[in-house]
Image (cartoon, rainbow, N blue to C red):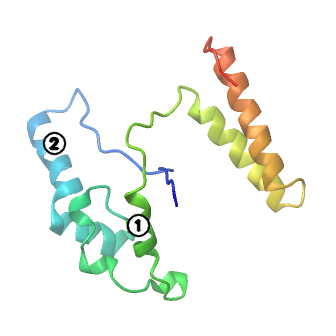
Amino acid sequence: MSRPAGNWGGSTTAVLSGTEHPAEAARFALWLNTDPEALAMANELGGLFPAANAGEDLPALQGGVGFYGGQEIFSIFQEASGNVDTDFTWGPTMTDTYTAMSDGFTAALNGQGTLSEALTAAQEASRQSLEDQGVQVAD
């Protein structure tokens, strides 16, 4: 059975062009996102699931998480991470998509529509946003 998964949210670590120490900043960014010690700190102190496969076996990812009533949430993340299509590319108007989804989900949670309607509206808003930018959209 196929269980596709995708990325949602997240962050990035960037080295700005004007920095005085670009090589050092790049080494720090690499350490921050791949070193087992750094990954363990990010998980233990911030509850972050590691972006690098190197962090999937961290002791901090084993066992339950108090905030979630002791549920073992990281095992679900680990399973899903193997199903993420790494050839996926975000669209050029994702901020519009995020806005439409957020607005629709908020409305649904406030009893002003359904989640299904929110997704349909977000799809149409995304299509319109892409077309407004001159991108051809296939059905």
| Rendered view: 61 above or below 114 | below
Whether residue 130 sits left or right of residue 108 in the image: it is left
Q: Amino acid at mark 2?
A: Ala
Q: Residue at x 43, y 86 (%)?
A: 64
Q: Which residue is mark 1?
A: 79
The residue at 82%/53% (across/down) is 107
Q: Residues within 10 Å of mark 1 (few under 14, many from 20)?
A: few
Instruction: Please name the residue shown 51% across and 53% down the image.
Output: 4
In this rendering, the answer to whether 35 lies above or below 20 is below
| Residue for point 41% across, 66% down | 79
Give residue 15's quadrant in the image: top left
Find the distance from the CA under tag 2 to the CA under tag 1: 32 Å
Q: Quadrant of residue 61?
A: bottom left
Q: Nearer the viewer, residue 26 or 90?
A: 90
* Labelled disc at residue 112: none
Residue 43 x %, y %: 32, 70
Q: Could you tell me which quadrant the C terminus lies in?
A: top right
**Callout 1, which amino acid?**
Glu
Residue designated by label 2: 25
